[in-house]
Image (cartoon, helix red, strand yellow):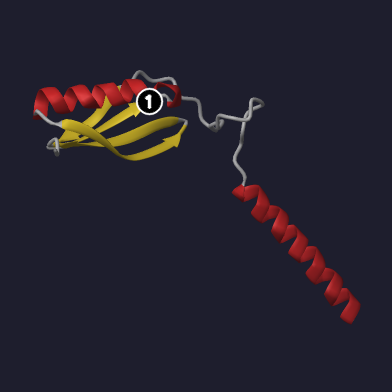
Amino acid sequence: MKKIRQNFLKTLSITFLIFLYSCATNNIDSSGGNLKYDKACDVETRILKSYGDTVRIEYEPTKSNSADNMASEYCLINRNKISTKNQVSCDGCCRATYLCKKEQY
């Protein structure tokens, strides 16, 4: 009975470690660089919502420069401020929040 319990605990521990390892690894492409996303993203860079000094932009992961430029233009033209990237989440498409701030010298 003791050996059965030990074997069961070993099997359970190994299964748990394999499961934990698979949850912690990133899905990296063959070049070793970029993450692959589960969902495809086929959207033009666009402003989802703007309110006061905050703007939320959606974009393809490969077009973050486009989103940065759009936020910069929005903050400069509409708020007369500079943009700062605040939060980013990507699950296929990326959504970033930018804050418009006054320049600090």
Q: Amino acid at mark 1?
A: Ser
**Nearest the eye: 62 or 39:** 62
Q: Which residue is mark 1?
A: 64
- How many labels were placed on the picture? 1
Considering only vertical position in the picture, is 102 above or below 18?
A: above
Considering only vertical position in the picture, is 94 above or below 87?
A: above
Quadrant for residue 95, please give it.
Answer: top left
Residue ranking furthest to the front = 105
Please provide percent x and percent y for residue 16.
70, 60
Please provide percent x and percent y for residue 13.
75, 65
Q: Secondary structure at mark 1?
A: helix
Q: Quadrant of the C terminus?
A: top left
Please provide percent x and percent y for residue 82.
17, 31
Q: Quadrant of the N terminus?
A: bottom right
Residue ranking furthest to the bottom = 2
**Nearest the eye: 61 or 48:** 61
Considering only vertical position in the picture, is 96 above or below 7?
A: above
Q: Is residue 10 left or right of residue 55?
A: right
Quadrant for residue 73, please give it.
Answer: top left
Considering only vertical position in the picture, is 25 above or below 48?
A: below
Q: Is residue 40 left or right of residue 47?
A: right
Q: Is residue 93 left or right of residue 68?
A: right
Please provide percent x and percent y for residue 48.
26, 29
The residue located at (25%, 22%) in the rendering is 70
The residue located at (40%, 39%) in the rendering is 89
- Answer few, some or many: residues within 10 Å of disc 1's Cα (few below 14, many 20 plus, some between 14 and 19): some
**Nearest the eye: 30 or 40:** 30
The residue located at (10%, 30%) in the rendering is 79
